[in-house]
């Protein structure tokens, strides 16, 4: 049994203990051992903890580390603090020792609420609306956007007023993203638009700064919304159609190759009997079968004779390769508008 020698310095002592816990020493690893100086004089040695794994390991073995260090010539103090739900540790042979108890586990319901809050904030930020686009959404939700009898889009601030002309191109991104729809002469919000506007008002993300061109550029649909779901369904359906077409084309090519190989075999028999050496576009006459004398004279394989007789009884047409279609993305109809009562409940009551 090999006896371990006593460490000759505090650096060697504490590094040996931590390596015994499975931690790696060195730059970019779990820890490093450093010297602490004050006014040009060395006051002690401490451990620089570099990874979360090392923090958790040291916190779990704090007492054991102190006991092992105290058993040798270089004792160390291990401090464990919990500024959050993760431990923050320090190991040194100088200074005070601090020990805090880990916080109680967060209830599952609280964690679920935090995750849901983060998800909804992410959905609001994902909208990437400008202030002008948010104002258009609010106006549509308040039934203030209508097409006048002359076909011009107008923004009616008050019922019965003249309204203000509005550039229709500003609505295009919101319509295409599934936030707005046009039932008749009115611009209305969809279910996605209603939920998006509620998120915008609830979480108040920083509006995107856009110039005139960017304000008319494409928008992303509501994250986890109806528009995203139906686009995914359409994309999946398109992929299935493409795969089905590719499989049909591959099967047709295999059938065509098999027919051509069989035709070559049968043609070689007819050419041998007829004394033809070059095909030059010739083909076997329909229903041709070699006679018994020809079979004997040319020693024709019985399998080929059987194939010729089967072909004579039931001619097999040459398989045709289907012409590939150009699969375009499915054009989705606009989402329906939400009922007015739903708009009132969800939007005008939102804070």
Image: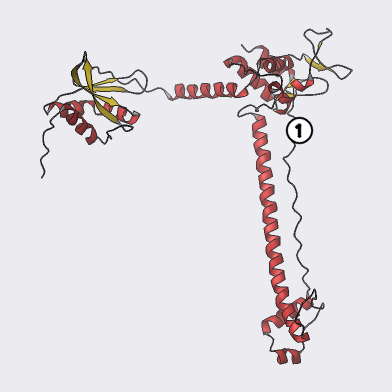
Percent position (x, y) of residue 89?
28, 23
Task: Give left or right: position of 51 versus 229.
Answer: left
Quadrant location, the C terminus: top right
Percent position (x, y) of residue 58?
27, 28
- Residue drawn at point x = 80 percent, y = 81 percent: 288
Front residue (pair 285, 107): 285
Task: Give left or right: position of 290 versus 228.
Answer: right
- Residue drawn at point x = 69 percent, y = 72 percent: 261
* Residue 147, placed above or below residue 264: above
* Residue 254, placed above or below residue 33: below
Front residue (pair 49, 187): 49
**Quick one: SS at disc 1?**
loop
- Residue drawn at point x = 40 percent, y = 22 percent: 106
Percent position (x, y) of residue 322?
75, 57
Percent position (x, y) of residue 76?
18, 23
- What residue occupies the far right of the structure in this picture? 150
Q: Is residue 57 visible?
A: no
- Tag 1 residue: 333
């Amino acid at each position: 049994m090999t006896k371990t020698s006593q460490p000759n310095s505090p650096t060697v002592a504490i590094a040996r203990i931590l390596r015994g816990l499975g931690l790696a020493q060195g730059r970019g690893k779990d820890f490093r051992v450093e010297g602490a100086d004050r006014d040009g004089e060395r006051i002690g040695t401490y451990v620089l903890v570099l990874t979360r794994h090392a923090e958790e390991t040291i916190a779990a073995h704090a007492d054991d580390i102190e006991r092992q260090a105290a058993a040798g010539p270089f004792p160390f103090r291990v401090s464990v603090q919990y500024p959050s739900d993760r431990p923050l540790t320090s190991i040194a042979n100088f200074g005070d020792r601090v020990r805090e108890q880990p916080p109680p586990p967060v209830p599952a319901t609280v964690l679920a609420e935090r995750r849901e809050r983060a998800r909804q904030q992410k959905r609001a930020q994902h909208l990437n609306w400008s202030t002008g686009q948010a104002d258009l959404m609010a106006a549509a939700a308040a039934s203030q956007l209508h097409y006048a009898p002359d076909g011009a889009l107008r923004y009616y601030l008050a019922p019965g007023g003249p309204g203000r002309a509005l550039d229709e191109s500003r609505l295009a991104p919101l319509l295409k993203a599934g936030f707005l729809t046009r039932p008749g002469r009115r611009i209305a919000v969809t279910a996605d638009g209603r939920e998006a506007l509620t998120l915008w008002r609830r979480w108040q993300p920083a509006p995107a700064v856009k110039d005139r061109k960017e304000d008319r550029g494409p928008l992303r649909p509501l994250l986890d919304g109806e528009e995203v779901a139906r686009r995914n369904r359409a994309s999946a359906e398109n992929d299935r159609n493409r795969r089905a077409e590719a499989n049909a084309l591959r099967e047709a090519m295999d059938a065509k190759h098999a027919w051509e190989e069989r035709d070559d075999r049968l043609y070689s028999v007819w050419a041998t009997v007829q004394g033809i050496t070059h095909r030059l576009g010739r083909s076997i006459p329909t229903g041709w079968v070699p006679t018994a004398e020809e079979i004997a004279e040319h020693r024709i394989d019985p399998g080929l004779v059987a194939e010729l007789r089967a072909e004579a009884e039931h001619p097999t047409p040459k398989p045709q390769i289907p012409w590939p279609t150009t699969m375009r993305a499915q054009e989705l109809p606009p989402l329906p508008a939400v009922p007015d009562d739903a708009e009132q409940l969800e939007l005008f009551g939102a804070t």
